[in-house]
Image (cartoon, grey):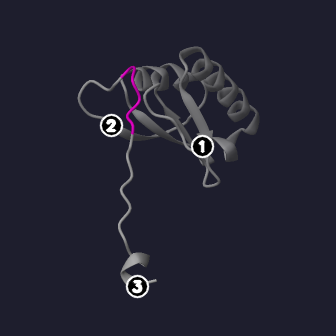
Amino acid sequence: MPIRDLFKRRREEVELPVGEAPAEKINVRIESLQGLIDVEKITKLVREGNILFLKTKELQKKDLGQLQATVQRLKRVCSQHDWDIAGTEDGYLVLTPKFAKIER
């Protein structure tokens, strides 16, 4: 087997999903989660086509019960609108609109 066969470039095809596409560009925003009052603001941002990283460490240190209630409410909103939500080990929640899915 010649060495050049080991290093051949593979051609991979990527299929773009058909459906709701972003209008012009995708914005990625980092916001701080303060509690239940932020759910409406977060919903508005994701509805506009933004991908959000939400910092949760401050709320976790301050009030764990409110963090749990806020995350449950965000999960319900995400399931209603077919958005994707995931948590990270670093204390962030990631929310994406329909056209972007989180690879787990």
- Of labels 1 and 2, earlier in sequence is 2
Q: Secondary structure at mark 3?
A: helix
Query: What residue would you read off at disc 1?
Result: 56
Residue 34: give x, y in percent of width and height.
Answer: 56, 34
> Residue 8 lies in what quarter of the image?
bottom left
Q: Residue at x 61, y 49 (%)?
A: 88
Residue 96: give x, y in percent of width and height.
Answer: 48, 32
Name the side, left or right, on which 93 lies relative to 7: right
- Most foreground residue, 77 or 83: 83
Q: Residue at x 38, y 20 (%)?
A: 20
Query: What residue would you read off at disc 3?
Result: 3
Q: Amino acid at mark 3?
A: Ile
Taking the view exactly as shown, the residue that stands out farthest to the front is 1
Q: Amino acid at mark 1?
A: Thr
Q: Is residue 99 above or below residue 15?
A: above
Spatial CA span between label 2 and label 3 = 43 Å
Q: Residue at x 60, y 55 (%)?
A: 90
Mark 2 Cα-neighbour bin, 10 Å: few <14, some 14–19, many ≥20? few
